[in-house]
Amino acid sequence: MTFEVPQSRASVKQNQFEFKMPGRQKKYRMPYMQFITNGLRDPLIEVFRELREHMKADADLDAQEAAKHLSQDTQLRMQELTREIFEKYNPGLYADMDQQQVAAVFNAWASESQTTVGKSSASSS
């Protein structure tokens, strides 16, 4: 008997972060971090580990300040991953945004992703 892999829960609305761009009516969505593909999530986790190490080393640093202390290679990888995530779930949107907007959405998405882990049985199963 062949095992059938269940559908991804990334498209379930309660498992998605929603945001709007200035001057646009459209609502954009992307899955919370725990629902993005492993090919995107795993390298992102590696970047977050390095970020956490900087925050542990200096308790006064918040995530944005700690990000300034990441190696250039890690900073570039973070930018690449951010672009890849935006392009996968909202093709073309990244090119229309400035870096401040990208950072604002990404930070809100990451923060909201952390607070939704285990939020409901549908999103955690």
Image (spheres, helix red, strand yellow):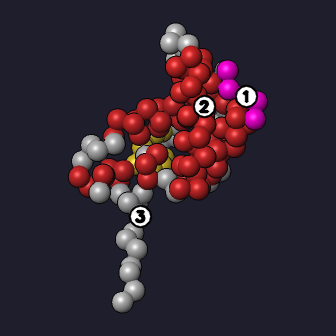
Relative image position of residue 6 (x, y in whole percent): 37, 71
| Amino acid type, mark 1 | Ser
The residue that appears at 54% across and 49% down in the rendered structure is 41
Q: Are marks 2 and 1 in contact (CB under 8 Å)?
A: yes
Q: Nearer the viewer, residue 107 or 26?
A: 107
Residue annotated with mark 3: 8
* Spatial CA span between label 2 and label 1: 9 Å
Dot 2 or dot 1: first in sequence order is 2
Question: Dividing the picture into quarters, in which one does residue 78 lie?
Answer: top right
Dot 2 or dot 3: first in sequence order is 3
User: Considering only vertical position in the picture, is 39 above or below 7?
Assistant: above
Label 2 crowd (10 A; few <14 / some 14-19 / many >=20)? some
Q: Nearer the viewer, mark 3 or mark 1?
A: 1
Magenta stretch bounds: 69-73
Using the image, tell me which numbered label, if any, was put on residue 50.
Answer: 2
Q: Nearer the viewer, residue 33 or 88?
A: 33
Label 1 crowd (10 A; few <14 / some 14-19 / many >=20)? few
The residue that appears at 76% across and 30% down in the rendered structure is 72
| Amino acid type, mark 3 | Ser
Q: From where the camera sits, is residue 110 visible?
A: yes
Label 3 crowd (10 A; few <14 / some 14-19 / many >=20)? few
Residue annotated with mark 1: 71
